[in-house]
Image (tube, grey):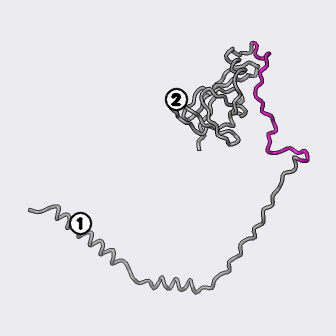
């Protein structure tokens, strides 16, 4: 009886050995043409290397136009003001009692001094009891916010924090001077 496994093994070894022998027959040990090429290149005269260009020293410039009464280019030329609410505007201008209480009785928070567009959500922290949003202000300072905090200039109260956005409700005045609520969101900053 013929052992097929042994026969297959012998045939595969024979093919492998013949391939190795045929490939080794193609290799030449003669490198005289390579040596001639290297000798030719090395016999050429060397070239002149150009010197490095002169590096000019840094000269500091101090901006002094503001001392002469000129405008500082690094400061805003307009003033951002938070909405002011006076007693006359509250009367019959669309404010509910709840909105009025919220506007008058809330503690001002640090992120209320910035435009909502200038704030960036950079992440979240999921805690067992509550979720926190991580917000970056224009000055590069990182803040931790939760539901109920206020951000932005338009009395934006955070109502929900999700993985990709912070949802909030703002109280704004329309063009007719009436107060109304509107939904807004701060999206996660994609890098």
Question: What crowding class fits label 1: few (fewer than 14 Cα within 10 Å), some (14-19), or many (20 or more)?
Answer: few
Label 2, on which residue?
129
- In what element is the residue under mark 2? loop
Answer whether residue 17 is magenta in the image: no
Question: What crowding class fits label 2: few (fewer than 14 Cα within 10 Å), some (14-19), or many (20 or more)?
Answer: few
Residue at 67% over, 25% down: 170
- In what element is the residue under mark 1? helix
Image location (x, y in percent) of residue 146 = 60, 30
Image location (x, y in percent) of residue 165 = 58, 33
Query: Most prominent secondary structure in the magenta stretch?
Result: loop
Label 1, on which residue?
12
> What is the quadrant of residue 184 in the picture?
top right
Q: Quadrant of the N terminus?
A: bottom left
> Which residue is nearer to you in this view: 35 or 99?
99
> What is the quadrant of residue 140 in the picture?
top right
Answer whether residue 81 is magenta in the image: yes
**Residue range highlighted in magenta:** 67-91
Residue at 80% over, 42% down: 75
Q: Which mark is residue 121?
A: none
Mark 2 or mark 1: name the one nearer the start of the chain: 1
Q: Comparing marks 2 and 1, which lies closer to the viewer?
A: 2
Farthest residue, direction top: 92
Image location (x, y in percent) of residue 102 = 68, 20
> Which residue is nearer to you in this view: 52 or 1?
52
């Amino acid at each position: 009886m013929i052992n097929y496994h042994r026969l297959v093994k012998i045939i595969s070894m024979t093919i492998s050995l013949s391939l190795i022998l045929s490939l080794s027959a193609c290799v030449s040990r003669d490198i005289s043409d390579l040596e001639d090429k290297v000798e030719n290149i090395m016999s050429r005269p060397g070239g002149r290397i150009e010197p490095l260009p002169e590096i000019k020293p840094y000269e500091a410039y101090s901006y002094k136009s503001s001392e002469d009464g000129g405008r500082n280019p690094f400061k805003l030329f307009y003033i951002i003001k938070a909405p002011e609410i006076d007693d006359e505007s509250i009367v019959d201008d669309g404010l509910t009692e709840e909105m009025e209480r919220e506007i008058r009785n809330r503690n001002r928070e640090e992120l209320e001094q910035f435009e909502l567009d200038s704030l960036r959500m950079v992440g979240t922290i999921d805690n067992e009891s509550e979720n926190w949003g991580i917000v970056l202000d224009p000055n590069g300072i990182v803040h931790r916010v939760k539901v109920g905090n206020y951000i932005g200039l338009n009395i934006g109260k955070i109502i929900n924090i999700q993985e990709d956005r912070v949802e909030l409700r703002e109280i704004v005045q329309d063009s007719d001077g009436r107060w109304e609520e509107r939904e807004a969101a701060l999206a996660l900053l994609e890098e």
